[in-house]
Structures are given as structure tokens and as C-alpha cells.
Image (cartoon, grey):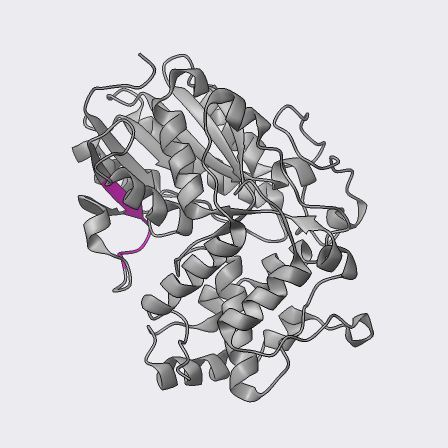
Amino acid sequence: MEHQSSVSVALIVGVTGMAGLSLAEALKQPNCLGGPWKVYGAARRPPSSWFPPSTVDHFITFDATDSADTRVKLIPIANEITHLFWVTFQFAVRDEEINITINKAMLQNVLTVLKSSRLTHVTLQTGTKHYMGPINDPVRSTQLNRHEPPFHENMPRLPYPNFYYALEDLVASYAPSLTYSVHRSSIIIGASLRSAHNALMSLATYAAICRHIGMPFRYPGSRYTWEHFCDMTDARVLAKQHVWASVTDSAKNQAFNCTNGDVFTWKSMWRLLCELFDVEFVPLDERQGFDLVELMRDKGEVWDQIVEKYGLHKTKLEEIACYDILTPVLRFDFQHVSSMNKSREYGFFGHVDTFKSIRFWVAKLKQMKLIPSYEH
């Protein structure tokens, strides 16, 4: 029997992020693998009004960097949890050693409370930085010795500090008492105001600001990425892979890439975004190069005006956009593509058309009143 049939109780740490919200929604589906599930959602801050409360049975607020707070909040439910879905991180753009220290401590604090309970499996969310190295480091990023795409799971680790490696080693150290799975996503597309790497929100706010002040919505990347292939990860596909691996015996103690299963060029993507965000398509002109981070640095008040005009949830631009994270991705000098062969060989066949995915999530962001919807 491949899939477990016992009662499953999930703790999703990072439930208000893109992956976490989609995970909660997936687990509450009546036909979800391993179900029915009881779902505890956890985050550092209480949920805002945009978060749908019906997606979790109970919401817990605690600071995973604080071992005492973690223990106090999790001890009451520790004997229930069978599956830990780890889809959170804290990220210092310029210092990977800090990332390692903080993120390892967070996961260690939670595992310390849960390890002697019913916990059987941990899913760990990471990404393609596993194959690329410190792309956001201002010094190391200029001299990277990365792997050649398409990226596949058996590529050796790179000789750079990486908090993904530290977290993988941590969960592996609990075997065989626990099993684990690692999920290496591409650019995640979903709906959340609590995700530090929300590329779609960054592009949506950029487009809305351009439209509001009459500024052209220009592509802030390179000609290489404009013309060459890239991939993405729909948060719904990612959620399904987490759940599948958590209840599938053959997937235990394995790492899996997770993408939509297709590729695109940013030129074609830009045309779609212009249609969805109601801005004019502007062809790439490298003679008009610009720095998106600098361009958007003083646009907070413009976003405030947009929020007020369209009755959106009250947000601050600096809290929902990540232009400094997005920019390097749009300037890669290689094709950002991961192989999904291993996932398919092990039995996971989740996929989605990336352009349909973008249409779905833009509509969702508008429905949630997180970005403007324009009537014609």
C-alpha cells in the first residue's frame, strides 16, 4: 500500500506565504492524498483580513527564532502533529551566513518540540539557488561557478555557504526516526502579502505604478532572459508535490525539483503581463537600461494613492514587493530551467500551463483586492 491511511495532522509553518496558503487549501480538499487532514497553520504574525480563515482548522502565532516562544505555543499540539510542512524562511539579502544561522535555528526549535511526538515526516521547501549559489550576494554573484541547466537533483553541492544545504542536513540528521522530502521550486507564483520572494506581486505593483503615473512598463532585465527560456512554479503544483511526497513511501528521504513542466521566454511573458495589467507593451531596448530597484525606491506614496483609489487592502510597497530579489533573476546569463524527470519517475505528474497559471493568479490577486482591477 503506497499511501498512508491513518489520521493525518499537518502543521504548516509559513501558512500565510504563497506555498503555505496553497498547501492549506490543498490539504482541506476532500480528495487530498492521505486525508482527511486536520490542519494547523502557523506564522510569525496573526493573519490579516485577506487570509481566508477556512483554510486551516487552527491558526497559531509564534516566533520560530525564539525557542521559548516556540515551545510554549507548540507543546499543546505536539502530540497531534504527524506531518510538518516547512515553507518559511528569513532572508538577509547580503549575508548567507546570517541566513544559515537564523533558518537553521528556526527549524531546529520546531523539531526539538515535535521530535518525540507522532511526527513522521517533514517536507522542506527550498529552491534553485541550490544549483546556482549566492545570486543575491553583491560580491560572490559576480564570480559564481554554477551548474549548467537544466538543473537536476543529483548535481553536487556548490562550494558556497547556502542555508538550503544547512536545512537539508538538519532534517536528514533526524533519519531514520523521521522521513523527509526536499522541494526545490523555481520562481513561485501564488497569492500572498507575506512572501519575501513574490515575483508576481513585484511585477504587478511595478505595472500599476507605471499605469498610474504614465510611465512605460519597461522590461528591467537583459536581452538574454528576454529571448531565452525560463520556468516557474505554480503554488498549487508545489502544494500537491509536498503532499504527495509526504504520504508516498518511495518519495521519502528524496529531493525533487518542482516546476510547472513547461518553459517560456520573458518576451512572451511580458506581452501577457501587459495585457493583464492593462499597460502598453514596450519592446526591449537595451540602450534604455535602468535599475528597477532605484526606479521604485521613491514610489511608496504612488502605491499608497493606488491603494486608496481602488479600495485595496492597506499595504506598503516595501512590504509586498521584492525588486532587489527579482532583478537578478531577470538578468541571468543562463536559462533558468529545471528537469522534472525525477518527479515523474517517482510518480508525481502535477503540471500546469504557465500562461494559464499567470492568468489565474492575477485574477486571484484582483479578487482578493491586493492589486487594482480596471474596468473598461
Task: Locate residue 138 relative to residue 257 in the image: left or right.
Answer: right
**283 displayed left or right of 311:** right
* Placement of the C terminus among the 4 image quadrants: bottom left
Residue drawn at x 67%, y 69% is 219
Q: Tell me, yes or no, whether the highlighted magenta stretch contains residue 45.
A: yes
Please state which of residues 96 and 228 is positioned toward the viewer in this rendering: 228
Q: Residue at x 41, y 51 (%)?
A: 18
Task: Write the start and end of the magenta stretch as one range.
Answer: 40-47
158 vs 129: above or below: above
Residue 257 occupies quadrant: top right
Residue 368 % position (x, y):
32, 66
Q: Name the residue located 24 percent from the left edge and 34 percent from the top edge.
A: 31
The residue lying toward the viewer, choosing from 143 and 234, is 234
Q: Nearer the viewer, residue 370 or 45?
A: 370
Give percent across and percent down for residue 355: 53, 55
The answer to whether residue 90 is left or right of residue 57 is right
Task: Please check the rendered image and state whether residue 168 is part of the magenta-colored stretch, yes or no.
Answer: no
Q: Position of residue 169 (x, y in %)?
A: 52, 25
Q: Quadrant of residue 7?
A: top left
- In which quarter of the view is residue 266 placed? bottom right
Visible residue check, residue 109:
no
Is residue 215 visible in this depiction of the protein? yes
